[in-house]
Amino acid sequence: MSQVVIENPIINSPFGEPTRHFRFADEGITDEILDGRRTSSYFVPIAKSKKRGAKQLQFDTEWTQDRIEENKLVNDIRRRVAMWRKGGYLGVTPTTARLIAYWTDPDREKKLFFCQNEALETAIYLTEVARKYGDACSR
């Protein structure tokens, strides 16, 4: 497997939802940029066989396409939170609405990164909103 060198790995602003990502191929990461946010996924580790006299199992660390497994629940929740965000954060308490407005204020001096806002939005969505609207992801 050839080693890929990515000269500038930063292709998105930390303040907005990711809009591009590097493609994974059968051989691993590439320097090819694709549009859209990468779906949440993880690599399935494969244990190497235990050798005689070895103290513990070791995992093969080849990060290739055939070992990627999608995080379906995470991707589903991301989609729902994104729709809720685009819809204006309906269903929250007045206090939560003020907090969200403060955290996402474009004129705020120390802006939060998108991932920080998304984590807050996800926690709020799951605790305040999903149950109100019968969303099964809250269970």
Image: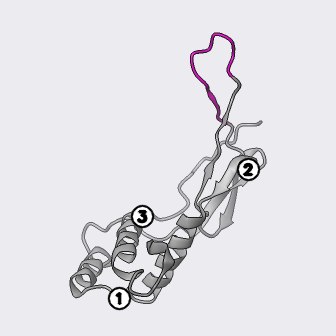
Taking the magenta stretch, the answer to whether it contains residue 107 is no
Instruction: Say which quarter of the image contains residue 39.
Output: bottom right
Which label sits on residue 40? none
Residue occupied by mark 2? 65
Query: Mark 1 and mark 2 in contact (Cβ < 8 Å)?
Result: no
Compare residues 108 and 67 and report the one nearer the observer: 67
Q: Residue furthest front?
A: 139
Of labels 3 and 2, earlier in sequence is 2
- The residue that appears at 62% across and 14% down in the rendered structure is 54
For the stretch drawn in magenta, the main secondary structure is loop
Which of the image's four quarters has the C terminus?
bottom left
Residue 128, how many percent across, how many down?
33, 79
Q: CA distance from mark 2 to mark 1?
A: 39 Å
- SS label for mark 2: helix
**Other-residue count near label 1 (Cα within 10 Å), few / some / many at <14 / 14–19 / ≥20:** some
Residue occupied by mark 3? 115
Instruction: Say which quarter of the image contains residue 93.
Output: bottom left
Q: Which residues are magenta?
A: 50-61
**Other-residue count near label 3 (Cα within 10 Å), few / some / many at <14 / 14–19 / ≥20:** some
Residue 2, how many percent across, how many down?
76, 37
Residue 105, how many percent across, how many down?
30, 79
- SS label for mark 1: loop
Left or right of residue 90, residue 8 in this image: right
Which label sits on residue 91? 1
Taking the magenta stretch, the answer to whether it contains residue 59 is yes
- The residue that appears at 69% across and 42% down in the rendered structure is 4
Of labels 3 and 1, earlier in sequence is 1
| Amino acid type of the residue tagged 3 in the rendering | Cys
- The residue that appears at 50% across and 77% down in the rendered structure is 136
